[in-house]
């Protein structure tokens, strides 16, 4: 063979190698974004447990109002709740952004909206008319109402918003907001996962270098600092202008980070940096609060509105720092399958819908007990709420097609032949369930 032909063959081999490497890289990237990311499931489960501990403390914390309150309250329990409140919902919205990404796979905009209608809007209606009313009724009993539940229940259909009336979504505001976000941004999500946005995804990849991914924090921090004092959190949508956008920014960050896997890799690589941001911001905020060095107090040494904004900015800095740190540490340590994960992942959504109603019913009687410490009441509230909610799910929701539909679950899988199951095991795992 001549030298010319040998050189040509080498060039062809080099070209084929480049094509193979590019195809292999594309395949790996596609698998990373289409496969189920186990750590996100674990983080979702952990965040719902955080909601359980947060809500269980609300009857016993000082200052913060709630549906039913214990006669004695705790300032220290209030402090732990303040800390949890900074990042529990931001983490849930971030994870929800990744869920929206997976549910958009191989779906059109209308198909995605239809799916979210079934998974979010139907359970929201069930919650408003079945799950939430017992909470309001027990609150009315605690405030002196003497009638039966069935005497009171028709007042729900007067559609007078709570607290004046009996119409409310209470803790299910999260589902309402999430449904609206997905409804509004479905066309944009569809474009982002399509090949039309390849250029945009390439630009996102540049943010994975160094610590540029943390620029995602800035819009939320700035927005919160400027508007949170003027527009406090209400969760009623109509008067929640600041927080409606604030929660949305976490959801969009979750969608963007899972859209471009290199951003998730950057969060994992820089997890200590994110934790440092969250920890240092928290320590500054707590030290200033405990020493009453806050705007409006005589100890506040600064003059000018810019310092007020900087103090307020500490709260979203804590939230973003802890959320991105938890995602980074979760990706590093929690990306492991477990035999119980599938069960837990299906259970968390119905559990979230149920838990506060169970809790209010339990707390109504717990707060009436005498000579019991706040700690014992709190532990009992957590334990009984968890126990009852899980059993309601396991016995009355999980087994039946109708209740699965009403609580936003996927239809129950039909048993498959052994050979089909074996083939299924070698396929990539499908998208994260709602």
Image: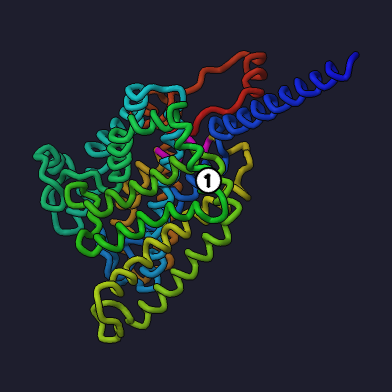
Decide whether residue 46 is among the magenta residues: no
Residue 434 shown left or right of residue 132 in the figure = right
Q: Which is more toward the observer, 226 or 295?
A: 226
Please state, as top left, top right, bottom left or bottom right, where the N terminus lies in the image.
top right
One can see residue 395 in this view: no
**How far from the left and from the top, in percent, is residue 210?**
57, 55
Q: Which residues are magenta?
A: 343-349
Which residue is at 42% across, 63% downward?
318
SS of the residue at dot 1?
helix
From the image, tell me which residue sits under label 1: 206
Residue 214 shown left or right of residue 408 in the figure = right
Residue 275 shown left or right of residue 233 in the figure = right
Q: Which is more toward the observer, 100 or 388?
A: 100
Which residue is at 58% across, 34% downward?
32
Please state, as top left, top right, bottom left or bottom right, where the C terminus lies in the image.
top left
Which residue is at 22% across, 52% downward?
240
Q: Quadrant of residue 31?
A: top right
Q: Which is more toward the observer, 363 or 403?
A: 403
**How far from the left and from the top, in percent, is residue 70?**
29, 66
Name the magenta segment's main secondary structure: helix
Q: Quadrant of residue 273?
A: bottom right
Q: Residues within 10 Å of mark 1 (few under 14, many from 20)?
A: few
């Amino acid at each position: 063979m001549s030298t010319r032909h040998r050189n040509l063959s080498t060039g062809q081999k080099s070209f084929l190698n480049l094509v193979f490497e590019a195809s292999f890289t594309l395949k790996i990237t596609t698998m990373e974004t289409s496969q189920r990311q186990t750590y996100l499931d674990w983080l979702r489960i952990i965040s719902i447990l955080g909601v359980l501990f947060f809500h269980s403390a609300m009857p016993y914390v000082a200052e913060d109002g709630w549906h039913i309150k214990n006669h004695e309250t705790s300032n220290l329990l209030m402090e732990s709740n303040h800390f949890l409140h900074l990042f529990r919902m931001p983490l849930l919205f971030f994870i929800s952004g990744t869920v929206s990404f997976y549910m958009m796979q191989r779906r059109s905009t209308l198909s995605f909206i239809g799916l979210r209608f079934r998974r979010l809007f139907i359970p929201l209606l069930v919650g408003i008319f079945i799950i939430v009313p017992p909470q309001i009724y027990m609150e009315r009993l605690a405030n002196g109402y003497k009638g039966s539940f069935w005497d009171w229940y028709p007042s729900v259909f007067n559609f007078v918003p709570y607290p004046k009336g009996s119409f409310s979504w209470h803790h299910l505001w999260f589902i309402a907001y999430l449904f609206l976000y997905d409804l509004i941004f479905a066309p944009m999500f569809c474009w982002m996962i399509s090949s039309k946005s390849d250029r945009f995804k390439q630009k996102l990849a540049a943010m994975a270098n160094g610590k540029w991914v943390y620029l995602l924090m800035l819009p939320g921090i700035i927005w919160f600092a400027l508007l949170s004092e003027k527009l406090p959190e209400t969760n009623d949508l109509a008067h929640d202008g600041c927080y409606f956008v604030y929660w949305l920014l976490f959801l969009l960050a979750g969608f963007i980070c899972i859209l471009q896997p290199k951003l998730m890799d950057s969060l994992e690589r820089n997890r200590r940096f994110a934790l440092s941001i969250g920890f240092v911001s928290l320590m500054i905020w707590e030290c200033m609060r405990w020493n009453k060095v806050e705007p409006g107090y005589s100890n506040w040494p600064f003059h000018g509105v810019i310092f007020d904004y900087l103090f307020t900015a500490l709260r979203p800095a804590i939230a973003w720092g802890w959320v991105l740190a938890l995602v980074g540490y979760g990706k590093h340590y929690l990306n492991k399958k477990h035999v119980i994960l599938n069960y837990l992942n299906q259970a968390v959504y119905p559990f979230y819908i149920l838990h506060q109603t169970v809790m209010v019913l339990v707390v109504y009687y717990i707060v009436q007990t005498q000579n019991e410490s706040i700690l014992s009441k709190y532990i009992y509230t957590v334990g009984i709420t968890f126990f009852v909610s899980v059993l309601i799910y396991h016995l009355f929701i999980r087994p039946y097609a109708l209740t699965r539909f009403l609580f936003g679950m996927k239809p129950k899988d039909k048993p498959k032949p052994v050979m089909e199951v074996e083939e299924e095991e070698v396929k990539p795992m499908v998208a994260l369930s709602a």
